[in-house]
Amino acid sequence: MKTKLILLALLFTQIFYAQIKIQEDSLTIEYEKTKKASQFIGAVTNVRTKTEKIVQYNIKVRIEMLDNKKRRFDPNKFSLIDYQDSLRFRPIDVAYTNFTDKWHFAKLIKNKPNYKSLEHRYNPDIKDTFLDYEFKGITNCTFPIKYEAYDKYKISFKNPKKVAHETYFEPKELRKRNINLYFPILKSTKNATLFYGNTKIEDIEF
């Protein structure tokens, strides 16, 4: 009986420390797991990484609002810091799923586009909060995403080409969800630390 009580106490202690409370945003974040992201068509991420120097990882976390009500959730506050190379990465895709479907946080672009098909991605009124946080001696590292200049419903006599834009995300109203964060990092990286704003969430080994 005493052994069972000790095991239960250890279990509840682990659960308690796994949930990080973010008081200013009225939510908790719990790290779940990390795995290499699939690059096959139909995978959860819709951003493909094509380079020999970069690998994309899926970091899964669970977020829950403290009052159990829908609130604005901003994934731009997540970052992954590689202390060995002094680099701070931002997600290139953020998504969540259920048994039958998947949803992506809408991607926004920093600069006004030259193509009408990309205009819905430009909204300077929505702030990129990734830039609100600084870490001494650490350099922010971003990977522009290439978007199709024309979508399939538009006709143009120009040759369609892909345009690269620095990208961030439009926040969503959520109550509680498992969130998939997709980070591109150097293949040489062995470990990194996940942050939400200035709050450390988890040390991760790859």
Image: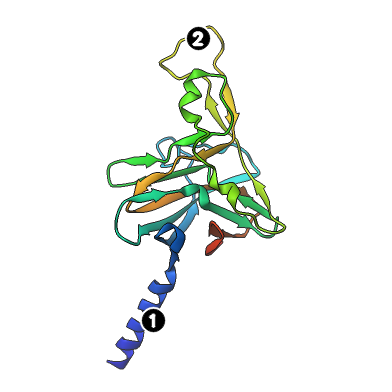
Q: Crowding near pointer 2: few (<14 within 10 Å), some, many (20+)? A: few
Relative to 97, say whether 24 is above or below: below
Q: Crowding near pointer 1: few (<14 within 10 Å), some, many (20+)? A: few
Residue lying furthest bottom in this view?
A: 2
State the quadrant of the N terminus: bottom left
Percent coordinates x, y for residue 82 in the rendering: 64, 57
Relative to 171, say whether 16 is above or below: below
Identified by mark 2, the residue type is Ser
The residue positioned 52% from the left and 37% from the top of the image is 48
The residue positioned 53% from the left and 6% from the top of the image is 157
Closest to the observer: 50 or 203?
A: 203
State the quadrant of the C terminus: bottom right
Residue lying furthest top in this view?
A: 157
In this rendering, does residue 172 appear at all? yes
| Left or right, residue 152 beside residue 98 | right
Quarter of the rendering containing residue 80: bottom right
| Left or right, residue 67 beside residue 188 | left
Residue lying furthest right in this view?
A: 137
Percent coordinates x, y for residue 119 in the rendering: 49, 24
The residue positioned 28% from the left and 46% from the top of the image is 99
SS type, badge 1: helix
Percent coordinates x, y for residue 172 in the rendering: 39, 44
Percent coordinates x, y for residue 158 in the rendering: 56, 10
Q: Which residue is mark 2?
A: 156
Q: Identify the mark at residue 71; answer none if there is no mark.
A: none
Quarter of the rendering containing residue 101: top left
How far apart are labels 1 and 2 at the CA level? 64 Å
Identified by mark 1, the residue type is Leu
First in sequence: mark 1 or mark 2?
Answer: 1
Q: Which residue is mark 1?
A: 10
